[in-house]
Amino acid sequence: MFASKKSSDVKKYVLKLQDYKKDCTSKLRYLKIITDVVLEEEAKSIFETNYSHIYYIFHETIYSLESTSKQKAPKEEFDGSLWLLGKLLTLLPELFARGWQCHSLSQIMIRILHPGNSYRFKKEGIRYFLIWYQILGPNAPSYVHDIYADLIPGLITTNDFRGPSEEEFNSSDILDHPNMKSHPGMSVFIDSFSHPIQSIEVAAIVPPNSNEKIVPPDPRDGLEVLLYYMVQTVGVIKWRDSDVICSQRHWRGFMFLFDKFKSVYLLVVCPNYDSTNSIYKPNLSLPNPRTVSKHNELIASCIVVLVNWLSRFTYDKFIQGWFELIQDDISFEKNPNLGYTQNLIVRDTLYSSVKNIDFIHELYRQAFLFSFTNKQQIEAIRTTISVYRDWMITTPPPFVTEYSDENNSKHKRNHHIDKTLKCDKQNILQVFITYSANVFLINTSNLNITFSSKTRDSKSRPIDEQTDVCKKVLNVYRTLVMNVKMTADTWQQLLLILLKITSTVLYQKNNLGGRLAQPIFQTLIVTWIRAHTNVAIQNQLWEQFLNVLVNLTQRNELIIEWDKTMQTLTRVLCRYVYSLNLLELPLDKLAENKGKRRRAWYGNSSRVQDNLDKKSKQVDKNFQNVKMECNSQSFKQNSKCNLNAGPNLARSCSDSKILIKSLSKDKNENTCSEHFRDALNLSLDDLNFAVGNNFFLQKQPAYKRKAISLDSLFQQKEKINYNNRRCSRSPSPTASSGIDNVSVKDNLVVDPLDLQDGNHHINSDNRSIISGGTSTGWLPDVAAIMWKRMLGSLGNVNQINKSELHYQIFRYLVDMTNNLIKIKINLGITHDNINTPYLAELTPPIGIVAPWCYGALMLDSSYKKGKIAAIQLLCTLATNKYMKAKDDITIFINFLHFILIGEDRDLMFTALSYLCGSKILSMLLPGHTLLLLDIVHASTILLTSSDFKEGMQRSDVISLLGCLLCYPSDRYPKPVLQPSPGFDLMECPDMQDHILNIVLRCARREPTARGRCVSLSFLGQWILHALTQTFIVPKDTRFKQNIPSNFKETKLVPQYHPRITECMHVLLRSLQMKHSAVSGAALESLRLCLEKSKEISEIDNLAQTFIMSICRAIEIHQSKHLKLVKKSFLISLCICLGEFCMRIPEVLLVDNNCIGSNENLFKMVISVLLNIYATNQTFKMDIENLTFLDNEDFEPKIVVDDINENNFFAQEDITNLKSVIRCGAQTVAKHLISYLSQFPIGIGASRLNSVVDESDDITNCPPTENSSFVELDESKNTFNFNNIQCLMLDKHLLGSFMELELYSSGLTAGLSTSPKQVRFLLRDLNGKSCWDASYLFKEFNSNKIVTFDHFFYEYSSKTQNQANILDSILPIKLVKGMRQTLRQRLPNELPTYNKMEIDCDQLNDILQYIGNSSPECLPNQILLNSPSPSPLGSYLEANTISIIINQKANETDNLIQYFNGKQNEHGMLNKKEFLGLHNSSSGSLHFQTSRSLFNHMGLSSWERRVQINMLTKNEKLYRDLRNVDLQKCRETHKIAVIFVGFGQEDKNSILQNSSGSANFENFVAAIGWEVELETHMGFFGGLPKQGCGHTAPYYATPFLEVIYHVATRMPSNTQEAVLTKTRHLGNDEVFIVWSEHCRDYRRDILPTEFCDVLICIYPLKNGMFRVVVDKKPEVPWFGPLYQENIVGGAMLSILVRETAINAGRAKRSSLPFYQQFYEEVFRSVDTVGMRYKEATIYEDFISRIFNPNTSNCKDSTNCVSHLAAALIDTSMKLNSKVAE
């Protein structure tokens, strides 16, 4: 219904349209209604049917507008007329194409396009004219072409004008261009023709409104409108044809317009357009520098419009998704329903011909020629850069051949483009590289123009915008270098352009060069490196590159980028030549893994194992992706290197002439059997500073050199040695690809290690591009050659004029050398710690920069910093064994000689500092001994200089002098260089004295704590050395008459160095310093000298001074406010004092005249120790003659505390500190009293205490009634016997009395005179002591029968009872009254047992006989029977003896009277009565002898009752007593000793050693003595008696025990034995490693959580030994060996042993809450006293002494009272006799 109504309406309106009576306005309205109702096809039919009527309507409407132009016509009429024109042109193209109404339309178009019309009206006119122009096409008449040529107002289409002169311009000058019209009706040009649109007869139809501002015509606006409507009019014409033909007509229409535009307007708007430039044959000539000109600026405004229009259809960002509009697998011909959009038509037109493609690139070239004078130009340049960037990287254009159908399926639609239009992508790259260089070559620094930036606060200048654009271009360059595949020509063009840019921009002194220096250098260097890995580069190009960089060495940016590049290339060299990752070196990873193990000590082991398994799988997966070039078997055969081989391994780190050798290939095998021998071709001559700039241009040899890929080589090595090694590649940062990212990171380092798959290609010949092959990417030879070339790219660095840059380069060279040294150290490191890998075949060229260093040292003083870095570098090479060539060593010694004797102290100090102290001596460089006097001279100047600087490592210099001081006399060099200019040799026999003076001065006045400690340590070593090297001279050298005799004895005395006393005084004076580390170092040196205590005592008054000085030091350091650091030091002073007293002769200690008073040294020592124990208060000693030599020259203050010992200790309670110090002093005093002149005891030095306890021999005595022998358990039944009693004799003194039956056998058979013996056990801080005592009786007569088993006596007659009984009880016949004088036998008479007399002293006579018959037994010619001086004095001694004799006489009288009374009553003394003389119960029978000894010792007196207490006897007491016995009474240390043979660098091989070298065995024998573990009685250090070898070295002193866990002594035949050995060694805190391997020992070889101190010994070829001490940071300072020392063989064992002991002490002192051995004993004894002490009254105490088990006595009360009464009576009687 609606359709029929619509059709009727259309017909009605069509009829009205045909009615001639209707006016044109009404008809136009009816026509609009019709077109709105009907479809487009119906409208076209209506227009074709009524074309004449419709055109008439249009014609009349237009002319009516012209007639009413002076009047304001309605806007609807204007719009309606233009609308109708558009409908006519789009719906009737067939009519207009045949020329229908051509003249009429031309007249109408002239009127519409009139310049006087409104701007909007003109724009619409241009649009409809372009539609009509497309319809006419090439058939258009000439006047239509003329109309087209005049479409842009103000612009003529001739090119015969000349621009203005070159001068400065303003933005307003654009309107004064000659092509501009001054007013709408007239041109400024005097031309002979008239334009059809501007003829006088034609007037404007629609003039502008009064509101519109009339401005001169701007050609840029007209050009924009023309280009815009050229695109908008495409596809709007409705041809009555098929879709395909219609689309083709559209395409041809736009092609016609585009061609006309190029022919009419192109040369006008772009006069510099060069049609000869073609993308297919690009012109790659290098651009030239330009300047900003006014002429170029006027033209550029139109080019900007054209470039912006062109970028809309070539930049993918503006036409996103245009490829997705058409399906990839269906061609255009097979899909007629799919039409082109306007953009696609334009794009296809631009890509449809060679000229159009060339037009695109030429127009973009014009964009690069802009002058940065306005924002539009700058944005156009940025757009152009982005277009090319997308073409080259992300979205290539259709005319590029690289992205064909088979390579990129996304772009399959591009096949419809003719193959003849295809161009190589490399052409695009080359064109962009060449064109974009123009942005660098224009100078905009003088332009006074500012642009408003995005932020209103700042404005930018042209130079700022140019810098930003240049960085964007450089960013694209680097992206091409890293991500795009380029041919050799493209690489070469890029390098040429970069060299042109570098030389042009950076040579000139302008702002652009300063802004772009760093990114330009970075891009140039990275491009240069990457080019060599992909293509072959000509030598001429290298020369240009070298010349450019050499001429720009005055720029700091070049030096910085050169350093970054060398760092990167060093990593490349490390990775591809030496198969290491410099950022993850094996040693660093081992240290890191060790730290992780520490942190994950309590972690989940299964989780860690899972992570390791994952990593291992990932490693295997990574290596599977690498293609193997050689089979595993052939590589194994060729990779094994013979260490003794000749030419293949005749290279070293100092021999830099490493030849490039060809890799052998087996012709009989198909598999590849070659392996990489050498890839470096580095020579010291290449870096000779006298050679010119092209000294690196050495042509490669003509022979072929084969090399395999690192990946395949590395993979094979992994399968052989490194099964779990990972080789990772980390991507490098690249520039962003977005157009908005216009800034570039100036500090961006493009990593050449980042290799894409497409850039790394290995061909069958396995030769790199740089070696003449075809394999690309990084290969070992490429890495080596590029490293070498880049190292020399700056030319001779000593020719740089700026001293700061010269210093900067050498500072970088030092860092590079350190990295090369790291590489060398990490070569051949085992990763599994199971097998030691082969030694590395290739070594880094560490010494290659030595010639530059020599050249730097020849420069003037302005290059001082560079010279300091150069000498640092040379010393580093020398001390790391990288200077072995004779020429190098000769030159080095020459320069070092002049530096050490020169006036420049900074150079002198640098040389001394970086000679690494004594390390230079261990290098054994040929001729190094010539410099010893120079070193002494320079050290003297440095150490005595008042110009002291903090931070100087003065300790290294002192260490060097100390090693020279302790050199054996036969090792001192004879000829040395004289410290003066020239090379004069001289003899210096007194060099050691000079060194001694310097060390002594340092020990007195060195301002640094570390330096003072080192000097004191070496002073102690020298004293020990001097005391060892003694010489013997006659005692009396005066003349004597030679008297003949049968025997002539010459007494000789040792003579020592005369300065020993002076050095000893310095050490003793240093003990008084407040700095704990310094005083501790002095004490360690003194303890070291204790090894020669006997020799010290032979020097006049030195031993006395030694003791008095230590006593004075104790006095000084003892104060109320103690610190923890003083605790260990004060106790160490006491122990050192005690040990010295134990070692020196006893005569010196008891001599009363040695210290100038009536007191002796021993009394002084005891007084000092007891004073510490008793009062803890400071005291003053009265020492008259204690003075030190050169005391005024001693400086007690430390200026720089570079040790800071307080950081190693934790604070502790002051009360506890005092208690510990008292305990230590008490221990030393008891040691002296107990063991003075008694050490070692008969059992040897391994034990000081007894091993006997209460349970030994207890079964020989009868048990009590409550026990039986069947139930004899030590812990339960020991104290149940009546013959044992435990007492607490003092607060910290425990005693046990046991009465045992005496059994004599063997040597003691027949010597016993009593049936009982008393065993007395004493426990205190000294440990446990044991005495066995018994009564001594006279020999029995023949008529006397004694039965000891039953204690029964029978006598021959009653009259002899009294005499016999007395004779059997008393040792001698007593006479009433005082003691009789004893008779003394002759010295030669032997006092046998048969000759024993009452008035003779048998012991005195036997000692007299021994001394007379064997004088060699006399100590110091003192008779054996002469009593030693009593410490109580002669007066007190005589009184004491008199009291004892009187007491004995009184007791004898009392006993005789008692016997006489018994004899009168009974006449005979029976068994029971005899046993009951002193006992009233059977329980006291088994303890009577012990009770007698207890009484004789004075312990039963009333005065001692306060101190003595009973102990509760039970099994807990027995257990605690055993715990006391287990405590050590001496300081104990366990030290691991390991032997490392040559070629051993893994755990397995080292632990498998069952023996060492001869030197090692001699060393082990010298640090202790061998003990059998099964019979050893001393400290074991955890070793079992069986299972860890038969013997072990052991060392002991009165205060110390050391056991050595020697790895070679322990078995390793089974896995369990190796595990046991590892546990014992790994638990030790100190390791001594004897290494004969060519590399230094590392901690991670035997990984352990302990090993706090590592002492490594390396034998040297000259018979000396290098000892390196490595401690953990938390261990405090210790000595005597410090860091690295050179030690002779005679002193090696003593120094190493003392250092190891001191290391253990230092470690323990840093442990919080660590208790020394005396603290443990003190605590154990104190625990027994507190737990088991019984508070008893006197009666109970006496009862327990009378009977240990009072419960066994039937009438204990009577017994106690009877015994107490007897004792009281006896005591009263004794007192009365004494009073008489």
Image (tube, rainbow, N blue to C red):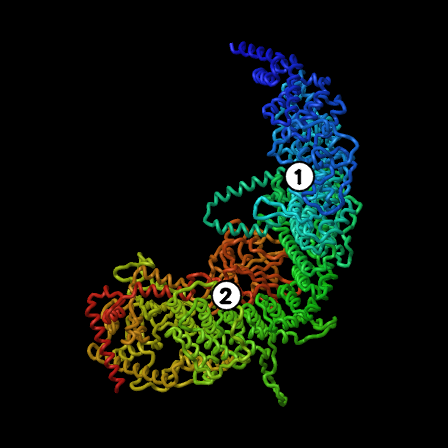
**Please, is residue 1217 above or below residue 211 in the view?**
below
Q: Secondary structure at mark 1?
A: helix
State the residue in front, 317 or 1504. Answer: 317
The CA distance from mark 1 to mark 2 is 67 Å
Left or right of 1165 in this view: 1453: left
Q: Position of residue 720 (x, y in %)?
A: 63, 44
Left or right of 286 in this view: 952: left
- Asked whether the viewer can see residue 1009, the reply is yes
State the residue in front, 254 or 6. Answer: 6
Q: Position of residue 405 (x, y in %)?
A: 68, 27
Amino acid residing under circle 1: Ala
Dot 2, crowdedness within 10 Å: few (<14), some or many (≥20)? some
**Number of numbered discs:** 2
Q: Quadrant of residue 1307?
A: bottom left
In the displayed orientation, state which residue is furthest to the bottom. 1041
**Please, is residue 1027 above or below residue 525 in the view?**
below
Q: Quadrant of residue 205?
A: top right
In the displayed orientation, state which residue is furthest to the front. 71
Quarter containing the C terminus = bottom left
Q: Are marks 1 and 2 in contact (CB under 8 Å)?
A: no
Which residue was labeled with disc 2? Answer: 1204
Q: Position of residue 507 (x, y in %)?
A: 73, 52
State the residue in front, 1480 or 176. Answer: 176
Amino acid residing under circle 2: Asn
Q: Quadrant of residue 1302?
A: bottom left
Which residue was labeled with disc 1? Answer: 380
Q: Earlier in the sequence, mark 1 or mark 2?
A: 1
Rendered residue at 62%/52% (across/down) = 826
Q: Position of residue 910 (x, y in %)?
A: 64, 65
- Which of labels 1 and 2 is toward the front? 1
Left or right of 837 in this view: 1201: left
